[in-house]
Amino acid sequence: MPFPYELPPFCLERWQSERETTAKILLSESGVEPLTLSELKGIGAEIDFDSVDLGYGWTRGDPRLRKRIAEYYGDINEDNVLITNGTAEANLLVVAGLIKPGDIVIVDMPNYKQVYGLLQARSAEVYEAWRSPKNGWHLPVDELIDQMRKMKPRAIFLTNPNNPTGAVERDSLKALAEEAEKVHSLIIVDEVYRGLEITGETPPSILELARKYNIIAVSTGGLSKVYGLPGLRIGWIASNVEGIIERAWAVKDYTSISPSRLSEAVAIAVFEPSVRRRLEERARGIVKANLEVFKQVLEDHRGVLEPWWPEAGAFLLARVPWTKDTWELAQSIYAEEGILVNPGECFDLPGTIRIGIGHASQEYSRMAYTKLMEALRNIGIGKKA
C-alpha cells in the first residue's frame, strides 16, 4: 500500500470544509471566482456534450487533452502527461509513486501542507527550507543549495508561485536546477498558480529548465485556481521523463482510475491556446482590480493589518500586528460576523491570516474587505482594552 502510516490532520482543508458552506462572506478561497458553463462558452470555449461517451475514459487521460497540456509545456509529448482528479490527486500520486520510506526530501516552507503531510505519512525524512519576509518571501537559495550538497536529497518539493505568500521564483530555479544536476535530485514543483502572475511575465516552468540542465523534473497543475474551474476536478502531472509518469500511473490504478469524461470535454476546450490565454487574462484582471480595492479599504483602516503584497495568486498574506493567536481570531470573526479567512496556524505562520482576493465583483470585494477590517478593528480594540 502507498500509505501504510497515519496521515496527519490537514488543518487548512478541514478548517475550510467545516465552515465554507455556511460563511456569509467567503474570503478563504485561493483561486479566482468560478465560471458558469455559459460564461465559459462566452469566452470562446467550444464544448459539445452531446457527443461525449459516458463510459470509462482513458486511465492516463484523453489523448487530446494530454496533447494540449504537453504543448503548453513545450518540448514534451503526450505520453509525458497524466491527467488526474485535481492537483490534489496529482500531488498524492507523485509522492506515493516517487518517494520511499526513509528517502531524504527538502520541502519549501511555508506552503499548502498537502505534500508535507503526505511525505510524513510516507515516512520520508523531511527537511524544511523556510522562506522569510525579509527577502520578500523568496526561496532561501543559498541555504537550499547547502542542504542539497550535504544531504543529496531524493527530491526537492517547491510551489511556484508560492501559496500562501504569492512569491514568484525566477532566476533562483536556475541555480537550484544546476545543483540538482550535480547531486542527482528530482525537482518537483506544484505550478497550479502558474499563469496568475500579477507583476511581470510568467516564468519558465521547471520542465523548460529541465531540458537545459539535464535534470529529472516534475510539474503538477490543474484548472482550479487560475482558470476558475475547481468543480471539474481536472489536474495533471507532467515530466520530462516518461518513467515518472509510469510510476504515478501505477498508483492511480489504486485511486481514481480515470478522469470524468464530461470534465475532460470541458478541459479540452479550455486548453485550446486562445481560450486558455483569455482565462489567464481574466484571472490577472480580477486579482489586479481587487488588490487596488484592498489598498483603498486599508487606507481607511490603518494599523489593522500589515499585508505582504503578492506577486501572484488570488490571495494575500497579512500580519495581524496586535495578536499572535490568529486561530482564535479567525474563529471569532467567523462566529461573530460569518467572515471566513484562513488562520496562519494552518501554514505554521501564527500571527498571520490568508485572505482571498479572487471575487469577480469589485463591489462585493469592497464590501467584504470593509467588513473584515471592521471586524478585525472591533476585536483588536477589545483585546487592547
Image (cartoon, rainbow, N blue to C red):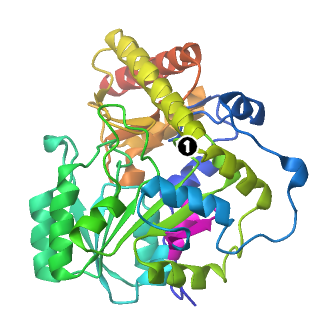
Q: Which quadrant of the rendered structure holds the C terminus?
A: top left
Instruction: Examine the image and state in which quarter residue 74 appears.
Output: bottom left
The residue sitting at the top extreme is 300
Above or below, comparing residue 87 to residue 28 in the picture: below
Question: Which residue does the image show at 50% across and 68% down from the upper left?
Answer: 77
104 relative to 65 in the view: left or right: left
Question: Which residue does the image show at 43% across and 45% down from the upper left?
Answer: 327
Residue 188 placed where, x, y %? Answer: 36, 68
Q: Which residue is mark 1?
A: 273
Q: Which residues are magenta?
A: 80-93
Task: Let me know if residue 27 appears in the view.
Answer: no
Residue 97 is one of the magenta-drawn residues: no
Above or below, comparing residue 380 to residue 334 in the picture: above
Q: Which quadrant of the rendered structure holds the N terminus?
A: bottom right
Instruction: Examine the image and state in which quarter residue 367 appears.
Output: top right
Of helix, strand and loop, which mostly describes the magenta segment? helix
Question: Which residue does the image show at 51% across and 41% down from the upper left?
Answer: 226
Instruction: Examine the image and state in which quarter residue 52 appears.
Output: bottom right
The residue sitting at the right extreme is 50
Residue 254 placed where, x, y %? Answer: 66, 83
